[in-house]
């Protein structure tokens, strides 16, 4: 089974629908996971990033945020807690590519699990595109 490490930008596309091309791909990625044809993996920090983004969105109340989190639980996405090896790799990636440690975390997760890390953040992707396990969702073929 193909596995993908996701950052919070992909999760955000599931809940704040936009007309961007990658929104449809993000929803398809979620559906493929629900159909058990791929496995999606996230760091626990990505949930907090998602909650923060939803909190800042005027359309989301505490109840809607709770429902969004419940839906993620229902999807059985693999959730990875803090691991020293991933944290050290994230620090290295953040330093070498001049990105935040929060952005580097999912990239380090992909490196650790030997799977592609997927993001919707084009500016981030431009900084880490030399890392062969990174992918911009709008360019991902699955």
Image (tube, rainbow, N blue to C red):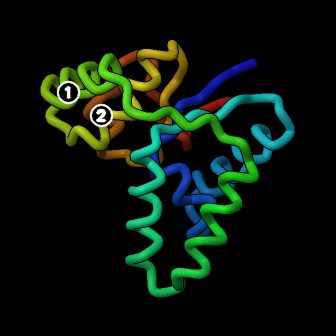
Picture coordinates of residue 134, whole percent (x, y): 44, 26
| Quadrant where the C terminus is found in the figure | top right
Q: Residues within 10 Å of mark 1 (few under 14, many from 20)?
A: some
Drawn side of residue 62 relative to residue 25, left or right:
left
Q: Earlier in the sequence, mark 1 or mark 2?
A: 1
Q: CA distance from mark 1 to mark 2?
A: 7 Å
Helix, strand or loop at label 2? It is helix
Nearest the viewer among 127 and 117 is 117
Query: Does 87 appear above or below 25?
Result: above
Q: Which residue is mark 2?
A: 104
Query: Does 77 appear above or below 9?
Result: above
Q: Quadrant of residue 78?
A: top right
Drawn side of residue 115 relative to residue 24, left or right:
left
Picture coordinates of residue 137, whole percent (x, y): 54, 40
Nearest the viewer among 113 and 116 is 113
| Quadrant where the N terminus is found in the figure | top right
Picture coordinates of residue 111, whole percent (x, y): 42, 17
Helix, strand or loop at label 1? It is helix
Q: Which residue is mark 1?
A: 91
Could you tell me if the residues under marks 1 and 2 are in contact, i.e. CB atoms within 8 Å? yes
């Amino acid at each position: 089974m193909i596995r993908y490490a996701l950052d919070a930008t992909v999760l955000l596309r599931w809940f704040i629908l936009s007309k961007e091309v990658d929104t449809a791909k993000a929803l398809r990625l979620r559906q493929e996971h629900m159909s058990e044809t791929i496995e999606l993996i996230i760091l626990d920090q990505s949930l907090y990033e998602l909650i923060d983004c939803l909190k800042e969105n005027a359309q989301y109340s505490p109840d809607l945020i709770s429902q969004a989190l419940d839906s993620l639980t229902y999807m059985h996405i693999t959730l990875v807690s803090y691991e020293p090896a991933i944290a050290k790799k994230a620090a290295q990636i953040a330093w070498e590519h001049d990105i935040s440690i929060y952005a580097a975390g999912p990239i380090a997760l992909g490196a650790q699990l030997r799977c592609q890390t997927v993001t919707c953040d084009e500016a981030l992707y431009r900084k880490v595109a030399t890392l062969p396990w990174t992918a911009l969702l709008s360019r991902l073929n699955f």
